């Protein structure tokens, strides 16, 4: 998306980069939306738990199994780690890192890769047509871009056609809601870098917490994600935050 945005701005978009929000923004916004994104992740896992989509496993079996598989593919044993680095210590590093330092570099670069295209170009253009188009159409386009992932997850491959249809509908609504939250962060902060951080915190924190759960039902997990993100949008709507966004450069 970032590369597509650079090409579009360079050759097909009259303002070029003049309206790109490449400013760093306020440091307080980084801390604020880092914390908010962590709260969104916590809400999501609360929904997974309430729906019975996951079971909590303090041993971190999910991470340890992934590590064992990766090392076996490289012809190594899970215990063939550098001296002083046990599998459990690696689990702690990855779990804590996903909540903190992994969100800075290369996390910020990964978040920027999406946000410069989707939030800094597509969303404002659609929002100028109609505010609802910025959120809904932008979210659906973002969902379509992620759509291949919905078909490669191991549990989703076992869905019946009816379950897959429901799953795609749930994911589409969830994508619109998550896109709306990130668009709000972008507009409120006035910085593509702040929203890049908020985005990568959602991804990395979710991965960190997922090391301590066992997934039992992918469809219910997707439903929980959509319900939690819809709750965030409902809060923003009730507060009037979505009606007062400013998108001027």
Image (spheres, helix red, strand yellow):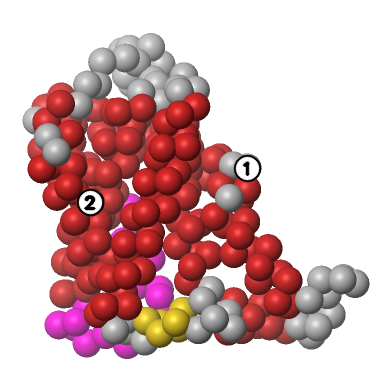
Residue 205 higher or lower than 134, as above or below: below
Say whether disc 2 or disc 1 marks the residue closer to the N-terminus: 1
Task: Tell me the quarter of the picture where residue 58 sits.
Answer: bottom right
Residue 100 higher or lower than 17, as above or below: below
Spatial separation of the CA atoms under disc 2 and disc 1: 27 Å
Given residues 222 and 159, the one toward you in this image is 222
**Residue underneath mark 1:** 105
Find out whether residue 163 is within the magenta segment: yes
Residue mark closest to the camera, 2 vs 1: 2
Image point 27% across, 44% down: which residue?
181
Q: Is residue 8 visible?
A: no
Find out whether residue 225 is within the magenta segment: no
Q: Is residue 201 visible?
A: yes
Task: Tell me the quarter of the picture where residue 82 sits.
Answer: bottom right
Q: Classify the position of the N terminus by image quarter.
A: top left
Task: Provide residue 80's location: percent of width, then percent of height.
Answer: 84, 80
Residue 177 higher or lower than 73, as above or below: above
Q: Classify the position of the C terminus by image quarter.
A: top left
Image point 40% across, 85% down: which residue?
55
Image point 65% across, 71% down: which residue?
91
Task: Provide residue 95's location: percent of width, then percent of height.
Answer: 59, 64
Q: Which residues are magenta?
A: 145-164
Task: Provide residue 114's location: percent of width, then percent of height.
Answer: 42, 42
């Amino acid at each position: 998306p970032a590369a597509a945005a650079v090409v579009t701005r360079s050759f097909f978009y009259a303002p070029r980069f003049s309206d790109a929000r490449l400013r760093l923004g306020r440091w307080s916004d980084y801390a604020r939306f880092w914390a908010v994104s962590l709260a969104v992740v916590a809400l999501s896992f609360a929904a997974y738990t309430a729906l019975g989509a996951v079971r909590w496993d303090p041993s971190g079996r999910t991470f340890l199994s992934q590590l064992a598989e990766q090392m076996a593919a490289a012809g190594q044993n899970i215990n063939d780690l550098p001296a002083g680095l046990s599998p459990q210590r690696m689990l702690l590093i990855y779990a804590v890192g996903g909540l903190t330092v992994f969100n800075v570099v290369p996390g910020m670069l990964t978040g920027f890769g999406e946000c410069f295209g989707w939030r800094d170009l597509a969303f404002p253009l659609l929002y100028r047509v109609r505010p609802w188009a910025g959120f809904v159409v932008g979210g659906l386009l973002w969902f379509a871009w992620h759509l291949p992932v919905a078909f490669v997850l191991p549990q989703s491959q076992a869905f019946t056609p009816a379950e897959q249809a429901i799953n795609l509908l749930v994911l589409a609504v969830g994508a619109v809601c998550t896109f709306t939250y990130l668009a709000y962060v972008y507009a409120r902060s006035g910085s593509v870098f702040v929203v890049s951080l908020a985005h990568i915190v959602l991804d990395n924190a979710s991965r960190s917490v997922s090391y301590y759960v066992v997934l039992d039902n992918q469809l219910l997990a997707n439903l929980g994600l959509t319900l939690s993100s819809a709750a965030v949008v409902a809060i923003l709507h009730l507060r009037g935050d979505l009606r007062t966004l400013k998108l001027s450069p």
